[in-house]
Amino acid sequence: MLRSKAFSLLKPIPLMSGQSNLAYKFIRPAIASHGHCCHRRSVDYRQRYKTHPGSAGGRTISAPQTKVMAEEELPGVLILDIGGTHGVLENLAALLKKHFRLITMKEFLQNKKEMSKKIQAVFVFECRPIIDRELLESLPNLKVIGNSGVGVDHLDLKMISSFGVKVTNTPHAVADSTADIGMALMLASARRLVEGCQIAVSPDTKYFAVDWLGVEVTRATLGIIGMGSIGYRVAQRARAFDMRILYHNRNRRKEEEEAVGAHYCEKMEDLLQQSDFVMVVVSLTPETHKLIGKKELGLMKPTATLINISRGAVIDQDALVEALQSKVIRAAALDVTYPEPLPRDHPLLKLNNIIITPHIGTATVQAIRMMAEEAITNMLAVLNGQPIPSEVFPK
Amino acid sequence: MCGKIMGEGELPGLLVDEIGGKHGILHGHVAFLKKHFYLITMKEFLEDRKRMSKKVQAIYLWWHKPVIDQELLQSLPNLKVIANSGVGMDHLDLKLVASFGVKMANAPRAVSSSTADTGMALLLASARRLVEGYHIAVSSGMEYSEADILGVEVTGATLGIIGMGSIGYKIALRAKAFEMNILYHNRTRRKEQEERAVGATYCEKIDGLLQRADFVMVVVSLTPQTHKLIGKREMELMKPTATLINISRGAVVDQEALVTALQTGVIRAAALDVTYPEPLPRDHTLLKLKNVIITPHLGIKTDKATYMITEEAVENILAALNGLPIPSEVLPS
């Protein structure tokens, strides 16, 4: 894959609704953004949505068998690119090719007349290609947008729906990897792992101080905000560390509660006040935007740690900076920020009681493959008029 | 002043290396210790040997200090017990100490959870390339590609635990929640019930474990038998996609062989909470490799665990001084 200069070229580009942005995809400088992120959009499409109640269960997602067809007969799927900075990884392209005729954005633009009719699906990988009105208007046979990943806050669900196009996501493929990252961040922050690594290799280190301590995870209290399938898996893992688990969710989940010994907190305030670790695992909607702000941070214990594996915008970042600087909370660990990546002069990057990772929630060889397979399954279901495992609806 | 006014001579004397400082007893523990003992630092002892030597009935080793040698043992006629902070006893000459009729105790209960947590923290950090990711996220102008951040899956992977004592078993309990497939190798096989509780499969030969594991976690005590337990041969048996995690003692892994294995892709990566020596010399090759993370012996370094260790040590010391069975006595093998 090509390397790209990540941060020096970062410029926010305001996007006005209705403005054509097809050209902008090629003019703007290449910026590495390896995450499910929409860092430069000032118009955002955060919307209410719910996943279809008929979402298929089970962890293993495998792309269904299709009979061998000549490439031309296969339904066309639009992708941004193969390889390159933001393109689909080579091995994923190979998976897609088994079921679809792959059409890159470049090929589409070079031959719109012929290509536009062939495209029945768009595979959105790491938020690309960007789906706007102009694109939708130019794809008369488009039936489905298959998103790789579970978050769809980068998609204008209402607008897409108005074109009669369905949207699907990949909730099953992401759950375990994302829960694992939540646990990794909690443990790394509690035990000061990143700081420790720096001490271990620093040329100035002469000895390891014995009064250099972290905080205990075993038997501590974990408060999970958002007990969906990812939050539940976090609870399952945390239970093995003898953690006391509290959770706050739109709806109470009695069965799951019993299975992991979690206590429901109807009021988020109660969870915040009692937790040693607060993990945010919600989807980004208008209701969850800045869910954790100054008030919520103030309710947390001064010894507590905040972990965010949702979306950056769920936390009021300015309030977080202040809380970390004045030790209102002990520390934070973020796999997601707003934007991604943060501007290089952002105060969050200067604090020593924070860990930030570049949205690696599903960054494993296996998870990326599973997401592609789940997206393929969903797209084929739409095209074949079969029940759709993970359709996402505007509210 | 406390309720019962006791002359300092009435509390048994407890020798410690120092209070505070680089390696000293944590300040937060002093009040608790003073409830039960008359604290004597090595400095105070050396300044006034004649008077102090008879008072010392117990020694509390904090991070392997003070060093216990023949001379010290000979100068403490009333010494009854040495309590170690932590579980490893490889820094003590157990036979020598026993020859003076002095009992020894470690603190296994207090350390096991925190050390197991450290093992899991390292496993996850290495698998998901957390430290590399952090540097990418916060550094200015750093170029990176997908290949730089893609890690390997933990859920559903195979974990091979070498040494299934109380720490190893707690690791198995945690790993099970990640749906990991658990193999283990131990001097003695655990009870079937215990194996079933964590879904662990016994590997009588270490080779079988090494060949099948995606993550190899070493959780043994350092003895002559476990010295360089993991060397060139063992690493070559491991999968090239596997990760080695060491939370035992540095000397359990052949460090030179590890450098070679990491440089040539014989194994994917390593995560070491312990090295030999600690810290490593600043020019050591291990510090330069991208596919290894080294932590400064995090083991039990939490507020709660360290306090529990002192509590456990005090419990052992008081038992010894009162002629009662010592909860965590360690005998020379």
Image: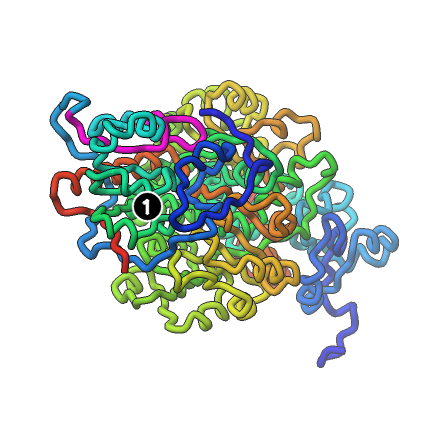
Q: Position of residue A308 (x, y in %)?
A: 47, 54
Left or right: residue B254 versus residue B15 is: left
Q: Which residue is mark 1?
A: A133
Residue B103 appears in the rendering: no
Q: Residues within 10 Å of mark 1 (few under 14, many from 20)?
A: some
Question: Where does the magenta region start and end?
Answer: A73-91
Find numbered disc 1 in the image and state the secondary structure of the residue it sits on: helix
The residue that appears at 33% across and 25% down in the rendered structure is A110
Left or right: residue A250 versus residue B220 is: left
B73 is within the stretch colored magenta = no
Left or right: residue B313 versus residue B70 is: left
Q: Quadrant of residue A201?
A: top right
Residue A233 appears in the rendering: yes
Main secondary structure of the magenta stretch: loop
Left or right: residue A220 versus residue A258 is: right
The residue that appears at 41% across and 61% down in the rendered structure is A224
Quadrant (top left, top right, bottom left, bottom right) of the C terminus of chain B:
top right
Q: Chain of mark 1?
A: A
Q: Position of residue A246 (x, y in %)?
A: 40, 65
A88 is within the stretch colored magenta = yes
Q: Position of residue A126 (x, y in %)?
A: 39, 39
**Nearer-the-camera pick, B328 or A52:** A52
